[in-house]
Image (spheres, rainbow, N blue to C red):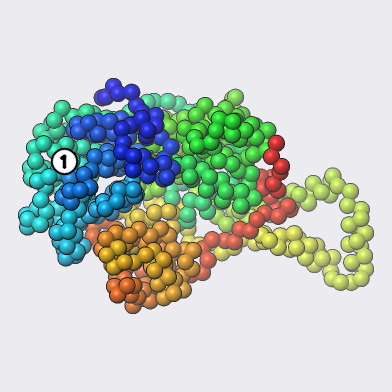
Amino acid sequence: MTSLNSATSFEQLSLSPPILQALREIGYEAPSPIQAESIPHLLEGRDLLGQAQTGTGKTAAFAIPILSRIDLSKRVPQALVLAPTRELAIQVAEAFQTYARHLEGFHILPVYGGQGMGSQLRQLARGVHVIVGTPGRVMDHLRRGTLSLDHLTTLVLDEADEMLRMGFIEDVEWILEQTPPTRQIALFSATMPTVIRKIADRHLNHAAEVKIKAKTATVEAISQQYWLVSGVQKLEALTRILDVEDFDAMIIFVRTKTETVELAEKLEARGYEAAALNGDMSQVLREKVIDRLKKNALDIVVATDVAARGLDVERITHVVNYDIPYDSEAYIHRIGRTGRAGRKGKAILFVSPRERRMLRAIEQTTRQPIPQMRLPTLQDIADRRIEQFKAQLVQTLDDEDVGFYRELVDKLISEEIGDPADIAAALAYLMHRERPLEAPEEPELPAFEPAREHRREKKSPEGGMLRYTIDVGREHSVQPKDIVGAIANETGLSSRLIGQIKLFDTYSTVELPADLPDDFFKRLKKTWVRNQRLNLQLVEDGGRQQPSKKPAKSGERKHAKPKASEQDKPAAKRRPKKAQP
Ligand code: AMP
């Protein structure tokens, strides 16, 4: 265990200016615990044994120091990251590229089985700075002499226990032996089985040990639930929860400063009184937000961990962990924002399939199982709105003087414009024209996912999206807009539904909704961009697979959600904008 004082800002870590700039732009507010503890050792060139799981920020914990020390003038592999799956290798390579956005001329190459050798060989020959690969394919290249590790300064073993589980450990050790004795090794593993420990003892040199420790704690006053991200996007899930939960005030936790602002804006656009709270805001501004929350002028605050530290507002009945926290301690701190002053609180945690381990770690720390929740269906929401409509009618009949309207309706009836019940129905219709009370058709929702082996999981980058590779990349001078244009034109898919596109040298990745009809893939088969056939392939563990042939479910996936009209505020939470105090 290290006894370093953890850095509370990236500026305190001696990172290179282009990396700091990238981190500022991405909006990371502070290093996560694994980053604060690992980065100083890695920058010093020390070996490191890190126990941390997915979701703790471990990728950046090794990528950032590697990039800070890379010598761009030497186009030889200086760092090698070994990862258990193709999927993880791609993800890690993407993370590197994100942090390296200001490193002009930086080249990283992901290598994994199932990918054509040709382009890998071409890129290796041209020279790259970092390689991320699965052990098998890296070994292939070493054997063929197409990859040399003579100038390697850092070797990272990512998810070492997974590599062990998948039977790669001998390959990993063989690769280790091909590296110069001077290189630094960083070994990350979620668990530390004896075999991994032994490898560490054998190959690591006076390694610093970093473990994200789990303290025990109890959180009795707070009822907890988690939703496994599947079927619908997180924003859609959140708005459904907002529609049915009876909350007074709510705090929503996200990971980045940028996201606090974006999500708060999206909620405002949907009629909620929401604001961001993050470390970029001045103290005065932050206090103003908290004050508005206390005084009922705000109902939802979207915050980062740092900004919400110590927040004490009795009104907060709900905490939503929109992004999972880095560790159990942060989780306990977050949910402790509710259940104040002896009141009851509710905490909801969004967990993506890859983050299940973090969920288990949280359960261990809090010594409480967290039950899985069923996402409210569109019918649940409609039922609730009908109940509210009824309550509103009853209250109006009880409390309001409706004499003028009674006369008006009597007149309409005497004019025989329609049956009294039909007139009432037409009025109810007019009141809800913007957002009808009828439940829209539900997109197929796997509300309760059976606990699948997390490695088998298809990657769903954002809820209902899947990631694909396409065989056109930077070296074909392609731009994201060419890809969006081609897909939208060929298939008729709205460009709005095309998710993130990332360009690599020989290929790119694109995120598409999970529920596309068969026909979509047929059309794309014939699509060419920049003289390259797209050859769309699902990013899935164990090599390239055919795109999934999901049951066709075309049309709009999200139900229309226009701005709330005055009559139509669920739980009195959607309300017209007030002047700020
Ligand atoms: P990992 O544990 O490497 O899989 O990272 C999990 C997620 O945390 C990724 O989506 C990262 O973009 C994000 N992340 C990593 N470090 C930070 C940070 N310091 N602040 C906010 N988000 C982060």
Kindly indicate the quadrant of the structure image that contains residue 69.
top left
Compare residues 316 and 536 and report the one nearer the observer: 536
**Quadrant in which ligand 1 is drawn:** top left
**Number of disc labels:** 1
* 36 in relation to 530, above or below: above
Compare residues 58 and 258 and report the one nearer the observer: 258
Q: Position of residue 351 (x, y in %)?
A: 42, 45
Q: Secondary structure at mark 1?
A: loop
Q: Quadrant of the C terminus?
A: top right
Residue occupying the point 61% across, 58% down: 561
Q: Position of residue 98 (x, y in %)?
A: 34, 49
The kind of residue tagged 1 is: Thr
* 124 in relation to 177, above or below: below
Residue 144 lies left or right of residue 41; in this view the side is left
Residue occupying the point 30% across, 63% down: 474
Kindly indicate the quadrant of the structure image that contains residue 546.
bottom left
Compare residues 133 and 148 and report the one nearer the observer: 148
Decide: few, some or many residues near mark 1? Use Cα within 10 Å; few <14, some 14-19, many ≥20: many
Q: Position of residue 208 (x, y in %)?
A: 22, 28
Q: Position of residue 529 (x, y in %)?
A: 34, 72
Query: Which residue lies under the disc numbered 1?
Result: 153
Residue occupying the point 33% across, 28% down: 213
* 365 in relation to 353, above or below: above
Residue 550 visible to the viewer: no
Residue occupying the point 63% across, 58% down: 562
